[in-house]
Image (cartoon, rainbow, N blue to C red):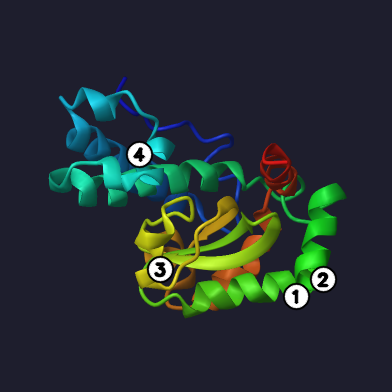
Amino acid sequence: MAFTLPALPYDFSALEPVIDTQTMQIHHGKHHQAYVTNLNNAIAGKAELESKSAEDLIRNLAAVPDGVRGAVRNNGGGHVNHSMFWQIMAPKGTGGGEPTGPLADAIKTAFGSLGDFKARLQDAGVKRFGSGWAWLIVKDGQLAVTSTANQDNPMMAESILAPTGATSGRPILGVDVWEHAYYLKYQNRRPDYLAAWWDVVNWAKVGELFAAGH
């Protein structure tokens, strides 16, 4: 089965004013669609790859033939990353606020407070040179913050990520810091985008992802 672009769980305008309508239209319909198209092209005719999920492909890049490994890493990662990104955001009123339950407790244990966690994640996003992502991951049973380059994902092998300064783990929250995610509204002000982004985080979904591995 060819990979397909997942529908957004809300309207293109739903994340206003944090993320503008035009950015959402381009980001989802052009950028994410390109990752899906390029991933399908990379694995076309390779039955051993076509039978795998995108997550399985990027978890075990060593099993992907050299000739298409780079394309699968970049475009498979882009597809997986964005598929999560759309899900962990929600319109203001549903998004934003604070996490509750076991996720809230785990954040407090790992970082001291929600405010300290937000500062850590924002710092990781600001300091990721060029394009990439900032992540909340579960590693060895504990929450941790990391960032990845380009469309890498923390579920990739440590041997793949380590040279880029990233840490592997199970991602439960990721924020896109590629310029196409924010430039129309924020221009070069990545810190402002990251600070505003908390108003649309779908903590209920992040909590589900956290609980899924326990």
Instruction: Identify the residue at horizontal 31%, vertical 37% (top origin).
Output: 36
- Of marks 1 and 4, the one in the foreground: 4
Q: Are marks 3 and 4 in contact (CB under 8 Å)?
A: no
Quadrant location, the N terminus: top left
Residue bearing mark 3:
162
Compared with residue 130, is residue 138 higher up or lower down, i.e. above or below? above
Compared with residue 58, is residue 190 higher up or lower down, i.e. above or below? below
Assess disc 1: are there few (<14), some (14-19) or many (≥20) residues with their C-alpha within 10 Å of its C-alpha: some
Q: Are marks 1 and 2 in contact (CB under 8 Å)?
A: yes
Compared with residue 80, is residue 40 higher up or lower down, i.e. above or below? above
Residue bearing mark 1:
116
Q: Quadrant of residue 180?
A: bottom left
Find numbered disc 2 in the image and state the secondary structure of the residue it sits on. Answer: loop
Q: Are marks 1 and 4 in contact (CB under 8 Å)?
A: no
Tell me how far mark 3 sits from mark 4, CA to CA.
18 Å
Q: Amino acid at mark 2?
A: Ser
Assess disc 2: are there few (<14), some (14-19) or many (≥20) residues with their C-alpha within 10 Å of its C-alpha: some
Residue 9 is marked as none
Instruction: Identify the residue at horizontal 74%, vertical 55% (top origin).
Output: 96
Residue bearing mark 2:
113
- Of marks 3 and 1, the one in the foreground: 3
Residue bearing mark 4:
57
- Of marks 3 and 2, the one in the foreground: 3
Find numbered disc 3 in the image and state the secondary structure of the residue it sits on. Answer: helix
Say left or right for 104 vs 28.
right
